[in-house]
Amino acid sequence: MIEVHNIVKDFRKTIKKPGLAGSVASLFRPEYETVRAVDDVSFKVPEGEILGFIGPNGAGKSTVIKMLTGILTPNSGSCRINGYIPQKERKKYVREIGVVFGQRTQLWWDLPLTETYTVLREIYNIPDAQFKKRMGFLTEVLELDQFISSPVRTLSLGQRMRADIAASMLHSPKVLFLDEPTIGLDIVVKDNIRKAIRELNRNEKTTIILTTHDLSDIELLC
């Protein structure tokens, strides 16, 4: 169960003054303004559900994800995910979640995927038998077999996204956060990613929160 109550997040932004004199003044005597990125957001997500956030750039979608994962701390309000307060119980909490940021990767650029997953197995202390079974399942669902021995730097964007989702699911998290998982992908690859997400949710009852610009993601997944 995910419970979010009245979370607010503000950022301090430097006010840029015009001209060279303004730039010099800002360097030595900076002035700031407060920008509200998230304003009084509340929601609940039952176990095994898929919740989607849709909105334009700057709407605060990724900021909400970062607060739910414990990367950012809200200025006010509270989050509780499966009994954990992300910012206070971070070491225990991160073993319960998987996270994918569409414009970043958790994979090692020059390593083959197989070696990357082996490193993650050690990080999460996954027993060999469980790891082998898990990799078999994820390879089938996400269709990794064609490129699983390739270095990450040689993968297409769609392949890397599937590989990132597999990395985030390797330790069988109860909650999966996907920040724009279909950004920049073509129609066929988007469809494959959506099918994989649906299958992971159906087979494992994983609670999923995703952000997107694409209304089709919401219609087909949530």
Image (tube, helix red, strand yellow):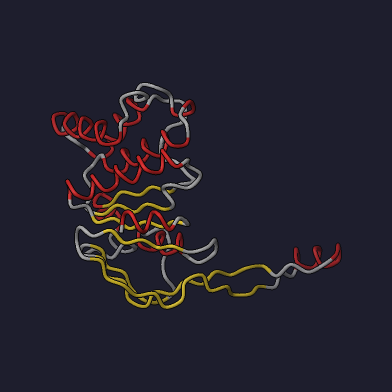
Where's residue 162, x and y in %? 36, 37
Q: Is residue 97 left or right of residue 57?
A: left
Q: Is residue 47 left or right of residue 178?
A: left
Question: In terms of image quadrants, where is residue 133?
Answer: top left
Residue found 54% across the figure and 61% down from its top: 57
Residue closer to the observer: 218 or 17: 218
Q: Residue furthest left?
A: 129
Quarter placement of the N terminus: bottom left
Residue closer to the observer: 181 or 68: 181
Where's residue 3, x and y in %? 27, 70
Q: Residue furthest top?
A: 149
Quarter placement of the C terminus: bottom left
Residue closer to the observer: 6 or 70: 6
Where's residue 75, x and y in %? 44, 74
Residue found 41% across the figure and 48% down from its top: 181
Where's residue 127, x and y in %? 16, 33
Q: Is residue 106 above or below residue 10?
A: above
Q: Is residue 159 left or right of residue 126?
A: right
Q: How many marks?
A: 0
Residue found 40% across the figure and 54% down from its top: 216
Q: Is residue 44 above or below residue 143?
A: below
Residue found 19% across the figure and 61% down from its top: 47
